[in-house]
Amino acid sequence: MKRVLRVMAGMVLACAVPCLGGWILDGQSAGQAAGGSGESTGSVVAVEGTFPVLRLELGGQWTDFELKASTNNFASLVYYIKSSGTNAYEDDTNVWIYFTDDYAGDVRRWVKSAPGTGIWSQLVEPTNSVVGAVIVCPSHECAVNWEGWMSPTNERLVWSYVRYDGIDLERNASGTKTRWSAAVPVEWRKQRIAP
């Protein structure tokens, strides 16, 4: 009996585990294990989220931002919003922007920015509060139809943002150009974040 247990302990047992493309048997798909081509006979549809979630780093004096997206590396735009002032949300009438306020009663609470209102003016202590980052949840109510470009599989889709302090956009060291930063969605969701 001891010898049988030792042999069994040293054996690698083949097992079957499910995956999106079918069953995997001992490291091979079900079709390959049965001598087939490995192609799945069933239909598997992966449901992807169509709502991007972007985290934009602000910090210091920076409380607001402009965000742009393009599918041709900024020869033209498919998306543009500005979080501050009357020009807010120009291309997306229902974007959700969340921030935290380090002077709020509960500093952990996510605050949903009011449309058309700069984040700086919503802070408890506008001159002292620091907005470390914002979470941007674009909607499907965009000027350019979202179905043509807003997808996690669109390899041409790129995002950039510039920080704003309520007076001016962030600029390079010589002050001659605005300083834009690349951004990518941290995830794609089926529904937008709604705390």
Image: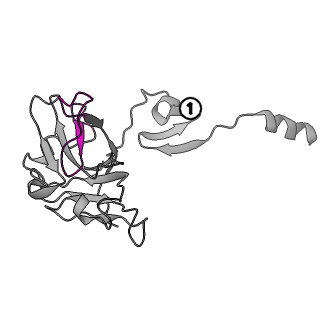
In this view, 109 is above or below 29: below
Location of residue 98 in the rendering, given as x and y in whole percent from the top left corner:
30, 59
Main secondary structure found in the magenta portion = loop
Q: Report the front residue among 44 and 138.
A: 138
In this view, 37 is above or below 48: above
The residue beneath circle 1 is 27
Q: Quadrant of residue 154?
A: top left
In this view, 68 is above or below 135: above
The answer to whether one can see residue 129 in this image is yes
Location of residue 72 in the rendering, given as x and y in whole percent from the top left corner:
14, 29
Task: Please state if 17 lies on the left or on the right of 22 as rendered.
Answer: right
* Extent of the magenta region: 153-179
Location of residue 85 in the rendering, given as x and y in whole percent from the top left corner:
13, 57
**159 in the magenta segment:** yes
Question: Quarter holding the C terminus?
Answer: bottom left
Question: Quarter holding the N terminus?
Answer: top right
**152 in the magenta segment:** no
Element type at mark 1: loop
Residue at left 28%, top 35%? 181
Residue at left 7%, top 49%? 143
